[in-house]
Image: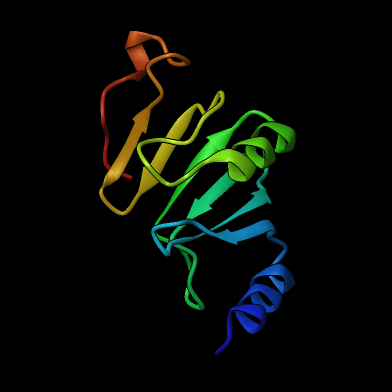
Amino acid sequence: MTDEEFIAFIRSCEYVNVRKLPNGVWIGVAKMLYTAGLFVGLTMEGYSGKYHYPTMTDAINAAKTWDGNGDPPGPWVKYKDGNGERCNQRMCDESHSDSTTV
């Protein structure tokens, strides 16, 4: 599958701002029920993790500027993957900062 075909498939799944990071990992943004998600590690089968942002604009801006190193920029609130979740310490108070299993 070419990159163009992959992008077309992912966009058909309602993702926007789909792109490949310099490290080869695919990312995209999608609206969720109460937040917007910056999805990391997109594949034909799903994704490896997601950062929750308060708005689509915040998530899109992060997707446009993130180089894939560390966490993405902007006011992400929580990161979730198959190993659990963690709060952005700049956004969550201490009562919500413990890592818990999803």
Q: Residue at x 66, y 52 (%)?
A: 30
Q: Can residue 35 be seen by looking at this rendering? A: no
**Colour setting:** rainbow
Count how many numbered circles sit on residues in the image.
Answer: 0
Nearest the eye: 92 or 74: 74
Where's the C terminus, which quadrant? top left
Q: Residue at x 48, y 36 (%)?
A: 72
Q: Residue at x 43, y 13 (%)?
A: 90
In this rendering, the answer to whether 88 lies above or below 32 is above
**Residue 66: image x %, image y %?**
52, 41
Residue 27's quadrant in the figure?
Answer: bottom right
In this rendering, the answer to whether 96 lies above or below 54 is above
In this rendering, the answer to whether 62 lies above or below 97 is below
Q: Can residue 92 be seen by looking at this rendering? A: yes
Q: Is residue 8 left or right of residue 87?
A: right
**Residue 46: image x %, image y %?**
48, 68
Where's the N terminus, which quadrant? bottom right
Q: Is residue 87 left or right of residue 6?
A: left
Nearest the eye: 27 or 96: 27
**Residue 52: image x %, image y %?**
54, 37
**Residue 62: image x %, image y %?**
59, 37
Most extreme residue toward the bottom, as rendered? 1
Nearest the eye: 28 or 45: 28
Residue 79's quadrant in the figure?
Answer: top left
